[in-house]
């Protein structure tokens, strides 16, 4: 790009002398290589160099962004986790650490950043499918209401609701919403739920989405991959 700009400027500049050979300069006319013309030529060269530097800077920024995304991809390697006893499976970030937490069947946290986590809760229910409880929109509204009832919640907003069929043929609801909390600040939450063998399975992904470190597109894609991988597994 920079070479093309320089070439274009050079072609434009030379045309004043090459494409007008019949132009003559009288004694009263300043010669073509007067100090004034020399300054014009210098200015054009300076502009060309400035544009070259700007283009090089843009290339550097793009490359830095590319390598940053590659780094994030390496940090967010996924591996499958299966709980054969409870009967569920999903992909989880391989570098996240398994921790114990009351109420959670399993929970993985990002090292040194516990606010970023993914976990599963399993509870017995009288339902044979989520459809018996309500539509995806109805369940989503219940989730948002539950978030708003928490004392630490400043604001909760639903972003997206979806429904899919799992590889096991189960009805799965998926939700995405954001929460502003006095404890953890702004965060993005992805949830998936299904019912199997009279049990409700709920996967929750919490990820920080603060203004100084917003959720980037690549990480979001990885978290959605985790969300879509949630399914039932054979019970041991």
Image (spheres, helix red, strand yellow):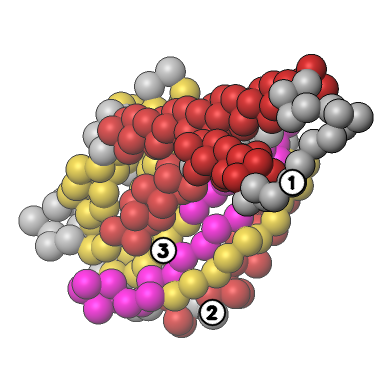
> Mark 2 sits on what residue?
134
In this picture, is 188 found above or below 27? Answer: below
Q: Which of these two is toward me, 37 or 64?
A: 37
Q: How far apart are marks 2 and 1 (CA)?
A: 86 Å
* Mark 2 / mark 3, whichever is N-terminal: 2
> Mark 1 sits on what residue?
23
Q: How far apart are marks 2 and 3 (CA)?
A: 12 Å
Indicate the secondary structure of the residue bearing disc 1: loop
Left-right relation of 111 to 43: left
User: In terms of secondary structure, what is the magenta stretch mainly?
Assistant: strand
Q: Specify few, some or many for label 3: CA neighbours under 10 Å numbering under 14, 14-19, or 20 or more.
A: many
Q: Which of these two is toward me, 218 or 198?
A: 218
* The residue positioned farthest toward the front in the image shown: 27
Percent position of residue 156, x then y: 71, 51
* Mark 2 / mark 1, whichever is N-terminal: 1
In this picture, is 204 found above or below 180? Answer: below
Asked if one can make out residue 185 in the rendered structure from this viewpoint, the answer is: no
Q: Which of these two is toward me, 19 or 119?
A: 19
Q: Residue at 62%, 30% (x, y): give it.
A: 48
Left-right relation of 221 to 31: left
Asked if one can make out residue 75 in the rendered structure from this viewpoint, the answer is: yes
> Mark 3 sits on what residue?
193
Q: Kindly report which numbered mark, 2 or 1, lies closer to the viewer in this rendering.
A: 1
Quadrant housing residue 234: bottom left
In this picture, is 135 found above or below 99? Answer: below
Q: For residue 83: magenta? A: no
Percent position of residue 111, x then y: 38, 22
Specify the segment rendered in magenta: 164-190
Percent position of residue 66, x then y: 40, 36
Q: Kindly report which numbered mark, 3 or 1, lies closer to the viewer in this rendering.
A: 1
Indicate the secondary structure of the residue bearing disc 2: loop
Q: For residue 173: magenta? A: yes
């Amino acid at each position: 790009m920079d070479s093309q700009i320089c070439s274009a400027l050079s072609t434009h500049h030379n045309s004043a002398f090459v494409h007008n050979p019949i132009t003559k300069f009288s004694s009263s006319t300043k010669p073509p290589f007067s100090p004034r013309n020399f300054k014009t030529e210098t200015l054009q060269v300076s502009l060309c160099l400035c544009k070259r530097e700007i283009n090089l800077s843009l290339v550097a920024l793009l490359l830095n962004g590319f390598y940053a995304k590659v780094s994030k991809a390496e940090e967010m390697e996924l591996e499958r986790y299966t709980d054969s006893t409870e009967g569920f499976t999903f992909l989880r970030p391989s570098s996240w650490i398994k921790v114990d937490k009351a109420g959670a069947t399993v929970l993985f946290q990002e090292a040194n950043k516990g606010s970023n986590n993914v976990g599963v809760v399993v509870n017995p229910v009288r339902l044979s499918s989520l459809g018996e409880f309500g539509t995806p929109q109805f369940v989503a509204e219940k989730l948002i209401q539950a978030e708003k009832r928490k004392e630490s919640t400043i604001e909760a907003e639903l972003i997206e609701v979806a429904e899919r069929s799992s590889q096991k043929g189960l009805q799965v609801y998926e939700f995405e919403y954001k929460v502003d909390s006095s404890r953890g600040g702004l965060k993005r939450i992805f949830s998936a739920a299904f019912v199997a063998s009279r049990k409700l399975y709920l996967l929750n992904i919490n990820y920080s989405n603060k203004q100084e470190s917003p959720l980037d597109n690549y990480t979001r894609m990885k978290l959605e991959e985790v969300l879509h991988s949630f399914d039932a597994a054979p019970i041991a």
